[in-house]
Amino acid sequence: MALRLCSRVLRDSSLVSRLLLGTTRQESATWFLTAGSSRGRKNGFIFTPACFITSDAFLNRLMKGKAVEADGSSYRLPVSVLTDGAEQLSLLMRHPDQPENAKVLKVALIGAPNAGKSTLSNQLLGRKVFAVSKKVHTTRSRAVGVLTEEDTQIILLDTPGLTTLSKVKRHNLEKTLLEDPWNTVKEADIVVVLVDVSDRWMCGRLDFEVLKCLAQHTDIPAILVLNKVDLLKTKDRLLDITAELTCGVVNGRKLRVRTVIKPPKAEKRSERQPEPSPDEDPAGLEGDADPSSALSREQLKALRSQQGWAHFKDVFMLSSLDKEDVDTLTNYFMVAAKPGSWQYHSEVLTDQTPEQICTNTIREKLLENLPQEVPYSITQSIELWDDGENGELDISVKLYTKKDTHMRMVIGAGGQMVGRMAREAGEDLSRVFLRDVRLKLSAKLKV
């Protein structure tokens, strides 16, 4: 087995072993896996630990959108979102200022709800433009993020978590949750399938809706991204997960995972597969989420028996909160980009309007701070959007609740809850718009 480090070379074999098995404090958080044979060895495969986790201070500064310096180099701040809706629309319609040898790549991020698609998209862009929370269905419709560097433009297509028609009907969800992921994949140059490896019940097999989507678009290259590896205590488990989710095949070549690394005192892991969710069709024959699905009943039945997908081009293992991890994926996209016309001007960061970013950010705070179904039933109305005298942006938003008990939860004791959510959302918006934002939230019972 060949081991290579992008930024450094690990020559101490004992350290390499401890890194792979997760027994050292300085963990390698990103892995790039390709099938193949290393020189002088048969049926091996190449692991490239791409980096070490950066310091907390560095990450904190980065996530706050501030320019930071490390090793004598500075990081360029990404572009911001215009706060005037008309100006933002004008920017979106502006002719792309592409160079002569322009390259472009459309990347669709798909996966089960809460896999970390929006978090990864934000990190790739360098600014938080997509809402993120621990609750499911935070992303309600497709949104575009644009990363432009020199002659290359990467268009990130962030999608809602793949779901089923029965769940949409049962929970009265928007149709965009059902349709947008499928429609988005059709226009992508590459599909990124995100899996949360910290979810012990879901990381052992690909979501059935993900498998259906991949099976219907076999002509589009797909890569597997194992996310949240920093939350996995035993890194050797990543090898098992990789084997399961790829059916032991990457880029058309067979992997021999279990014989490569086996800790001497490894515990026997249960081979029991997670039970289907109550919302799932146990027979696996429910109608495809995409109304125009070309998959037959027999194909759906065959997919139900699969744990993974044997046609992934590459596999990444990373933590989407680590900048160096994300840089590794960014570089991969840059190399994969093909000659073509840019779709957006280089100053475009997202296709969302400033008002959409505002309401999505507020919804994120509602989801994070309110229990159970409460945040899903709250609607918003922007009542004020105006420039202040000192260059700040004044925003006032009314939150409408269906029950009086919900309204009291939103307000909190002495108005502390609504005040905290307004403060947190305002700080996030300030980093997106690159200007001070004064956000006021109020709650009202909808009659």
Image: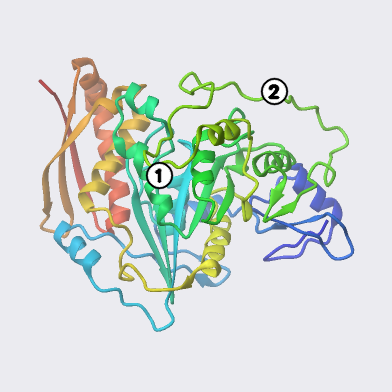
| Residue 7 x, y percent position in the rendering | 67, 66
Q: Is residue 7 above or below residue 414?
A: below
Mark seen at residue 181: 1
Q: How many marks?
A: 2
Q: Is residue 269 above or below residue 13?
A: above
Residue 367 visible in the shown view: yes
Q: Is residue 181 left or right of residue 283?
A: left
Q: Which mark is residue 280?
A: none
Q: Amino acid at mark 1?
A: Pro
- Left or right for 226, reference 418: right
* CA distance separating discs 1 and 2: 30 Å
- Quick one: 76 or 343, which is closer to the camera? 343
Where, by quadrant of the figure, is residue 313 drawn? bottom right
Q: Quadrant of the N terminus?
A: bottom right
Give the labeled residue for mark 2. 272
The answer to whether the residues at label 1 and label 2 have Cβ atoms under 8 Å apart is no
Q: SS of the residue at dot 1?
A: helix
Q: Residue at x 24, y 47 (%)?
A: 356
Q: Secondary structure at mark 2?
A: loop
